[in-house]
Amino acid sequence: MISVCIATYNGEKFIKEQLDSILHQLSDEDEIIISDDSSTDATLDIIKKYLDKRIVIIDNQKFHSPVYNFENAIKQAKGDYIFLADQDDVWLPHKIDSLLPHLVENDLVLSNAKVVDASLNMVKERFYKKIR
């Protein structure tokens, strides 16, 4: 089972694109745990429209910290493998399939990322210059 943990706070601008990019990569047994740090925008309304049993929302949190908000999501995760996603991440297709074999053999796997602007136009091909 895979758990994707997302910490949200006023993330309405990208949350739909993010969830769309992740959900199609998950099986029916997997889950997305969303810990929301008392968003005041439409973040939760957008998430709740999905009506997807794989999405678990933990709302009304008052951490005022992405670190504690992520910790809260991770504590609720039931998966054998946990992926973390910032609320503005849009995942490339097959991200889970690409990383899962490495997670089976390692305790932690870090992936590179393309840096994009608000319109998802690429600004930088790689976030990290060098990966071993």
Image (tube, rainbow, N blue to C red):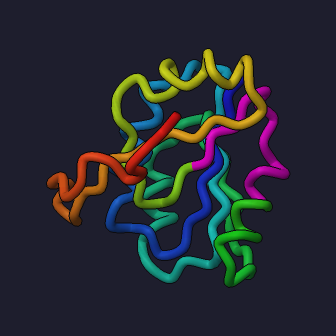
> Which residue is at 60% across, 42% downward?
55
- In the visual, does 74 lie left or right of 129? right
| Nearer-the-camera pick, 87 or 101 | 101
Give x and y (percent) for residue 14.
35, 60
Quadrant assignment for the N terminus: top right
| Nearer-the-camera pick, 54 or 83 | 83
Q: Which residues are magenta?
A: 72-84
The magenta stretch spans residue 49? no
- In the visual, does 77 lie left or right of 45? right
- In the visual, does 47 lie left or right of 90? right
Give x and y (percent) for residue 75.
84, 51
> Which residue is at 60% across, 54% downward?
6
> Which residue is at 58% across, 41% downward?
110
Give x and y (percent) for residue 20.
37, 40
| Nearer-the-camera pick, 120 or 63 | 120
- In the visual, does 43 lie left or right of 65? left
| Nearer-the-camera pick, 20 or 96 | 96
Give x and y (percent) for residue 111.
50, 39
> Which residue is at 71% across, 68% downward?
69
State how many labels appear: 0
Above or below, 131 against 102 in this view is: below
Query: Outermost residue toward the right?
Result: 75
